[in-house]
Amino acid sequence: MTIQKGDFIRVSYTGKNDDRVYDTTDEEVAKANEIYNEKGKYGGDVIIVGAGHTVAGLDEDLIGKDVGYSGSVTIPPEKAFGIRNPELIETVPITKFEQRPQVGMPVQVDGRQGIVIRAIGRMAQVDFNRFLAGQTVTYDYDIKEKIEDNEGKVKGLLGLYIGKEFSVEIKDSTATVEIPPEITFNQRWLMSKRQIANELIENTDIKEVVYLERYKKP
């Protein structure tokens, strides 16, 4: 079963830079490399091939492979996390920080995320480049399955974006997703719900996505 652009697949992977693991869908690998997140989702991600759900180099390498494929791909910066831009390394007064900056410290300055790369006196140099920009990375990956049914596609995409399980009903060409009250103001949900609906409508035969909030009298 050859993978094509637009297919929904479940893929497990481990991303490395100079043998340092920075991302993985394997819980044991995450723990062994001290990047485990107890709130994270492990066991593999459901993605739409070609939709930009992973770095471009890996996305492209998936096409033409078969379900069950296991392999590795080395990806140059321009198809991973981008080219490093020296203009994004800026000198910032330490008064901009809540605590005294230290080399390697993640910081936020005027709404931008960066890493302190040098701190001298009253000034600090902050690198605002994207994480791993300018770096060649390697992904070891396994294509676990191709998702064929619409319910699986909806649940998979919700899991990718939100990291939670949802109740889903498919009737005719409408997908109804029941939204638990506690997630109503979740920032990931608020930022992603329109994108999820658009991607489902564009990549499946689903024509309408309904988000249902249900409140009951105690």
Image (cartoon, rainbow, N blue to C red):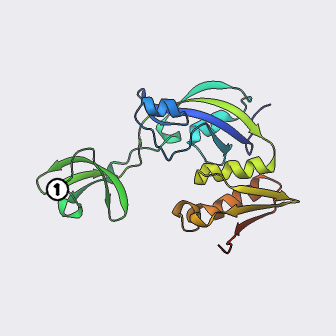
Residue at 19% in and 61% down: 93
Q: Nearer the viewer, residue 1 or 177?
A: 177
Image spot of residue 136 (x, y percent): 45, 33
Q: Nearer the viewer, residue 171 or 141?
A: 171
Image spot of residue 18 (x, y percent): 40, 28
Q: Amino acid at mark 1?
A: Met
Say if 41 sits above or below 162 in the image: above
Give the residue pinned by disc 1. Answer: 123
Q: Secondary structure at mark 1?
A: strand
Residue at 72% in and 56% down: 167
Say if 73 sits above or below 190 in the image: above
Quarter of the figure with residue 131: top left
Quarter of the figure with residue 216: bottom right
Residue at 49% in and 30% down: 29
Quadrant that contains the C terminus: bottom right
Image spot of residue 6 (x, y percent): 74, 46
Residue 44, visible in the rendered structure: yes
